[in-house]
Amino acid sequence: MALRFTTSSRLNRVSHQKTSAVFTSDSFNEGFGRLVESEWSRGNSPYSPNGDRLICIENRVVRQPAREWLRRLFPDLGSGEQAYTVLSVRNRDGSSPHELGAVPKGHVTDVQIGEVFEDIRWTPDGRNLIFLYDEALWKVPVD
Amino acid sequence: MADGTIALNPRHRKAAPAFRTLIVLLVFGAAIAAITTPRTPQLLERARKIGKAAPADRRIILSDHSLLLFRYTLRPHGSSGDDSEEDLYLQDVSAGTVTLQPALTQWYNRCWKPFNFEVTVSPDGKQLLFWQDTAASTGGGIISVDGLHHANISYRVCTSSGAAWSEDSRHVFLFPSRTGRLSNGT
């Protein structure tokens, strides 16, 4: 395998990857808000093969008012807040979020990207995401 | 009562409408609660399960049916004996087969143990870009998944803050953090 190195300053599309990675969001009780850039340290890039979109993993707390009300009567019922890890894709500038779905998350305060999904990657055609979850390989359409 | 009709107790006549009203209110309340309670769509309802992943210490997705597995062995690595070598396997999740990759394992243990490295998979899932970032330099290597074709990268100009593949899997990019310039290799 021959390897040739050159330098270039016009690779704007790919240069987005320099800023690293994936956006995570925590919305504890505050709705959807703060986007935090975080390091993506897995084997695959969060960016789609053509660089237009990126994978987002967000930790979200959903309040369940009815459950909170019932908890006043039955204290053993458990919290009225349920934590989820939400998988979505966005345009590379963070706009136009499209949620693919969520999986239950253990603890509200843990914000570790690699905690729920062991690895995620795009299919070469950019139409699906493949992810490792719960010791299995899954495939989900993006659109 | 000779005609067979049953007369209700007057108290029951009053209680029946009140009971019905209570039921209606409960059903209405439950419906409101169900509507107002946010429901998060479940990812696994939409996703398709391809298959179970084999046990490993680290797994990387190569494609929609294959995984790269890292498993620690009892073979010591290096002279100190503090670290052990790893075996690298290719798992075909659809077929349920796990195959040791001897050439890839040998290259990996020789070049990348025990360094703190990153690995990025090409979009076609056939090549791996290993790269390491230190204060002095950035080094890396490209290798095919079967371990039979590889090339090393020595890039000592500055440190790199990232690495990526081109869409056609023919180029790799390192992103230097000091000069702000991009580099690509073919």
Image (spheres, coloured by chain):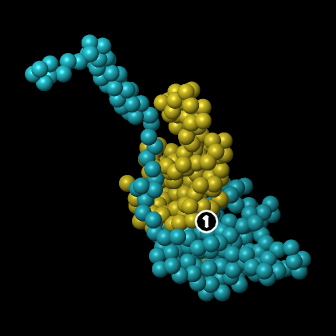
Chain colours: A yellow, B cyan
Q: Where residue A28 appears, x then y in whole percent? A: 59, 35
Vertical arrangement, residue A67 with respect to residue B149, above or below: above
Camera-nearest residue between A78 and B59: A78
In this view, B135 is above or below B102: above
Q: Which residue is mark 1?
A: A43
x and y, in percent, of residue A58 in the image: 56, 46
Give the number of callouts. Answer: 1
Q: Which quadrant would the N terminus of chain B be assigned to in this image?
A: top left
Task: Mark 1: give few (<14), some (14-19) or many (20+) Cα within 10 Å.
Answer: many
Asked if residue B85 lies left or right of residue B42, the reply is right
Outermost residue on the left side: it is: B3
Picture coordinates of residue A26 (x, y %)? Answer: 59, 40
* In-front residue for pair B100/A54: B100
| Residue at 52% from the left image edge and 29% from the top image edge | A70
Residue B21, above or below B70: above
Residue A23 in view, yes or no: no
Q: Quadrant of residue B46?
A: bottom left
The residue depicted at 78 percent of the width and 63 percent of the height is B134
Q: Chain of mark 1?
A: A
**Residue drawn where x is 66% and y is 68% of the image:** B58
In the picture, residue B157 is in which quadrant? bottom right
Quadrant assignment for the C terminus of chain B: bottom right
Q: Residue furthest right?
A: B80
Q: Is residue B40 visible?
A: yes
| Amino acid on which disc 1 is placed | Gly
SS at mark 1 in the image:
loop
Q: Residue at x 52, y 57 (%)?
A: A47
